[in-house]
Image: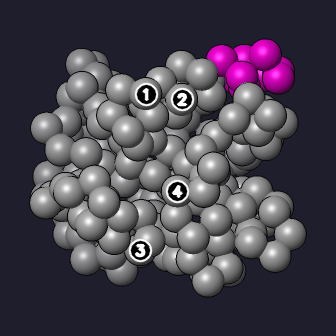
Amino acid sequence: MNVIETRRLNLRLLTLGDAPFILELLNDPTWLRFIGDRGVRDLDSARGYITNGPAASYAQHGFGLWLVERRQDGVPVGLCGLLKRDTLPDVDIGFAFLERFQGKGYGPEAAIATMTHARAVVGLKRVVAVTVPGNTGSISLLQKLGLRYERMVELKPGSPPVALYG
């Protein structure tokens, strides 16, 4: 089911059938470097990630990370969506794209549409984002969205701090 459509992309709910893509994305070098190892090593753990992450968020909040696919051929290129973390007062935007699809404008296209959806459909007045320092690609995209660095925060006690943009 499509949640958002843009000129070139569909953002839709993840299903268990997307497990092969999730397995690939969560083991992509860019994901591992900037987001972290989620321990997803096979299709069963990819299905568990979908069930316990995005699908659980859809049920609880009405939003979550959505699969981003090209409209022309249905090829999945990444994830983009909204996250509600227990450790942040605001909803944040998250995104990740396979390395081979980076630099093609898919990130800004999906993220701008997600921010519009967050305000117009979900009714959020404030959306934030977090990223590790040094993730210049994400920082550049966050700045294109109009977000600015606010401070460093810990998402979990004892975890390395991340930069909060709002």
Q: How far apart are the alpha carbons under marks 3 and 4? A: 14 Å
Instruction: Find residue 3 and name its label.
Output: 4
Asked if the residue under mark 1 is in contact with the one under mark 2, i.e. CB atoms within 8 Å, the reply is yes
**First reached walking from the N terminus: tag 3 or tag 4:** 4
Q: How far apart are the alpha carbons under marks 1 and 3? A: 24 Å
**First reached walking from the N terminus: tag 4 or tag 1:** 4
Q: Nearer the viewer, mark 4 or mark 2?
A: 4
Residue 99 appears in the figure = no
- SS under mark 4: strand
Q: Amino acid at mark 3?
A: Ile
Q: Is residue 9 above or below residue 1?
A: below
Q: Dot 1 surroundings within 10 Å: few (below 14), some, or many (20 or more)?
A: few
Q: Which residue is mark 1?
A: 59
Asked if the residue under mark 3 is in contact with the one under mark 1, i.e. CB atoms within 8 Å, the reply is no
Q: Amino acid at mark 4?
A: Val
Q: Nearer the viewer, mark 3 or mark 4?
A: 4
**First reached walking from the N terminus: tag 2 or tag 3:** 2
First to last magenta residue range = 38-48
